[in-house]
Image (spheres, rainbow, N blue to C red):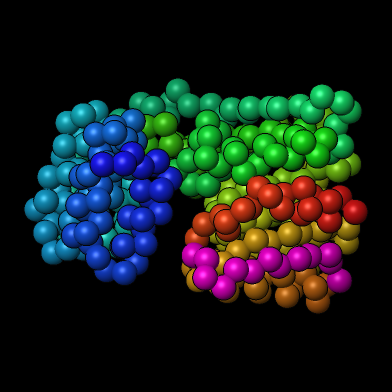
Amino acid sequence: MAEMTFQALQDKVFALHREGAYSEALSLIEQHADALAQHAVDLYYWRACLACRAGDPDAGLAWLQEACDRGLWYHDSILRDPDLAPLRESGRLEPLQKVFRERHAAAQAQARPELRVWSPDGPRRGLLLALHGAGWSAADEAELLRWRPALEAGWQVAAAQSSQMCGPGKYFWHDRALGIAEVRRHLEALEAPDHTVVAGFSAGAGVALQGVLSGALPAVRFLAVAPAIRSEVVLPMVETCRPDVRGYVVIGEKDWCWQAAVELTEAMRRRGLAVRLEAYPDLAHDFPPGFADRLAERLEWLSA
């Protein structure tokens, strides 16, 4: 059996989930679980969700129990997934949640924001600060490979990791205000130049654009990929933001964030702000294929 990368497995499992092929997705995970044991926290969670969707909540609970037995844990917000509704509604999830909360509190007490930085060989043309998606970290090579090509164009590249934990080795931006404050400190430490772009994926993109639009960050440019935003939060920011804000939104038309992203870009245009919407008809909540190949082009437009 050919080996599969974690990213490839995730793409296939999520596609099968969308198609309602839950048993097939479970079988696929079983085929590759041993080779991807370092991703156990995700694999157990996916199995639990898929089992519940397949009509077997007993198996779903058993997968979460096995994860617990191995010392793993999940934040309460993760366990609010609609897939796990049968376990929540029956009350059978509560004993595990109690253990998970205790483990989260212990891990969170030790967590700190982190920053990884790569500098070009010559003078930096600008600074690209990238924020990971929910459940990811600044150490996720798959996401970093999409941002680091900016180095070749002369940009300094930094990857910021939230201090907010949602699982072992996994971080999210649940408290947006706290996330923005951490990003601001990173930018100050990096002595952010005029050509600074705050970028991110999903929740990280939401932090990036909210920080820029609100004026809470010392930057006026954002690059948002599949931004997890709510119109009622960001649209008022558009009305009061600086007139030199520039934004670039990359999103799929099948993304659950699509409508809010469209409303954001339309509001920016009405305000006379520079903004681009790069849309992909068949893309769901993900980076588009070949994203890194066009990164320099997007940064060039943003730095104009």
Percent position (x, y) of residue 173? 53, 45
Q: Nearer the viewer, residue 206 or 56?
A: 56
Q: Nearer the viewer, residue 47 or 15?
A: 15
Residue shown at 20%/45% (left/top)?
A: 30
Residue shown at 58%/58% (left/top)?
A: 288
Residue shown at 62%/53% (left/top)?
A: 290
Percent position (x, y) of residue 276? 76, 66
Determine whether 255 is above or below 165 in the image: below
278 in magenta: yes
Q: Which quadrant, please, contains the N terminus?
A: top left
Q: Quadrant of residue 281?
A: bottom right
Q: Quadrant of residue 23?
A: bottom left
Q: Which quadrant, please, contains the C terminus?
A: bottom right
174 in magenta: no
Determine whether 93 is above or below 67 in the image: below
Determine whether 50 is above or below 71 in the image: below
Q: How many marks?
A: 0
Q: Which residues are magenta?
A: 272-284
Q: Nearer the viewer, residue 143 or 220?
A: 143
